[in-house]
Amino acid sequence: MATICLENVTKRFKPNEGFCAVFNLNFKVKDGEFFCLVGPSNSGKTTTLRLIAGLAKPDSGQIYIDGTPVNDVPPSRRNVAMLFESLALYPNKTGYENIASPLKVKKVPKEEISNRVMEAAKLLNLEHVLSRYPATYSGGEKQRVALARILVQHPNAYLLDEPLGGLDARLRITTRTKLKELQKELGQTMVLVTHDQEEAMGLGDRIGVLKEGIIQQIGSPQELYDRPLNYFVAKTIGKPMMNFFECNLRRQEDRIQVAHQWFRVDITERWLQCRADCDKEEIILGIRPEHIEVKDKRDSDEAFLATVFITEPLGSKTIVDFQVGRETIRVLVPGDIELEINQSKWLLFRKEKLHLFEKDSQRAIFQ
Ligand code: ADP
Ligand code: MG
C-alpha cells in the first residue's frame, strides 16, 4: 500500500530549452486509489509515470512515496511496478518464464516464485498460456501476461502506461472490467495513464486531465463531467462530445443574454446564482448532447428550428446531428423517438446545464 505525491514537479529533456515535458505537476494519489491521467499524445503521461517509477529524474520539485521523498531513491528501491506501453514480452520465454522474470532477477526462491506466478495466473485466467510462447497469444493474453508480470512483484503501487491500448474494442472493455475488479480486489494504489477518456472515466476514482505537460483539472469522473474548469477539459471529457458555439455576451439593462446568429438564451438567473464574473464579450457556449430538448412545437421563445441531418442509432439512445445554418448540433435522444432525415424540430437548451467559457482565456465563467 502506498500514497504517491508530486509537488511542483517539472521535467525538461533539454536543459536550456523552454519546453517542459511536464510542468509544475501537483497531485496526491491516496492509498488504495485508482488514479487516471488522461491527455492526448505527447501531453506528458509516460514522462509522469517514469518520474514516479524513478526512471527519469525531475529538474525541480519533489516526489514522495508513502510520505518519503524519493528523488534520490533508485527505481529498484521504490517498490512500484510499471507496465510499459510497449509490453515487450520475451518472445523466447514461456508465459511462466515471462511472468517469473522480475522475481528471478531479484533472486526470489524458486518455490516462492512458483506460488506467486500461479496466484497471478489464476487471478488473470492465464493458466492455459503458462507453457506457451508469446507468439501464440491473443492480444488480450499478451496484455494479461504483462500485467501478471508486475502483479507477482507485490509492489506497493502499480503504474500502468496505456495498458489497454493495443486491444480491439470488445476486448478493451472486458479487460477494463477485469482491471477494475483486480484493483478493488487488491485494494492497491494504481496510476493509469491513457489518451482514452472513456477508459479514464470507467476506471478512475479520480482523474487528472493533462494538456501539454500541465494538469488542467483533477476530480472525480462526475465532477469533471459536470463542472469542467476550462474548454479543454469540457472537450476532453464526455462522449459524444459537448457542443460548442462561439457567441457574444449581451448585457441589456439588468439582463444577460448569450447571443448567436441562430439562438439567444437569457442566462441572468444562472449568472447571478453562480456569481459569474466576466467582462469579456466573446465567449464559447458549451452544451452536452443530452442536455438539449427536441420538440415538435415551439413552447419557448428560446427554442430554435433545426433540421435532422444524420442519425446514429445506438439502441437505447440515438445520436442525432441537427443542422442550423452552417452549425451542426449533436443531440442525444431516447432510442424510440422516430426522426427522419430533413425533418425539422424545435431545439431548446436546458439552461441549468449550459457551460460558458471565455474565448481568450478558455476558463469556465461559471460552475
Ligand atoms: P505521452 O506519454 O503523453 O504521449 P510523453 O511523456 O511520452 O507523452 O512525452 C511528453 C513530451 O516529452 C513529448 O513532447 C515528447 O516528445 C517529449 N519527450 C519524451 N521523452 C523524451 C526524451 N527521452 N527525450 C526528449 N524528449 C522527450
Ligand atoms: Mg506515452
Image (cartoon, helix red, strand yellow):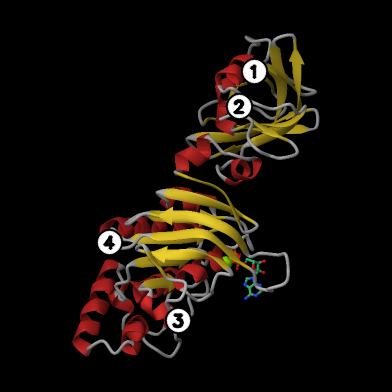
Residue carrying label 3: 89
Tell me the kind of residue under disc 4. Answer: Leu
> Label 2 vs label 1: CA separation?
9 Å
Q: Nearer the viewer, mark 3 or mark 2?
A: 2
Q: Is residue 162 visible?
A: no
> Label 1 vs label 3: CA separation?
57 Å
How busy is the neighbourhood of tag 3: few (under 14 within 10 Å), some, or many (20 plus)?
some
Tell me the kind of residue under disc 2. Answer: Leu
Residue carrying label 2: 354
SS at badge 1: loop
Residue at 68% x, 10% y: name it: 301
How busy is the neighbourhood of tag 1: few (under 14 within 10 Å), some, or many (20 plus)?
some
Residue carrying label 1: 267
> Label 3 vs label 2: CA separation?
48 Å
Tell me the kind of residue under disc 1. Answer: Ile
Quarter, ligand 1 = bottom right
SS at badge 4: helix
Residue at 67% x, 34% y: name it: 357
> Label 3 vs label 4: CA separation?
24 Å
> Label 2 vs label 4: CA separation?
40 Å
- Residue 27 position within the rendered picture, expressed as x and y whole percent measured from the top left: 47, 54
- Residue 302 position within the rendered picture, expressed as x and y whole percent measured from the top left: 68, 14
Q: Quadrant of the C terminus?
A: top right
SS at badge 2: loop
Residue carrying label 4: 186
Q: Quadrant of residue 2?
A: bottom left
Q: Quadrant of the N terminus?
A: bottom left
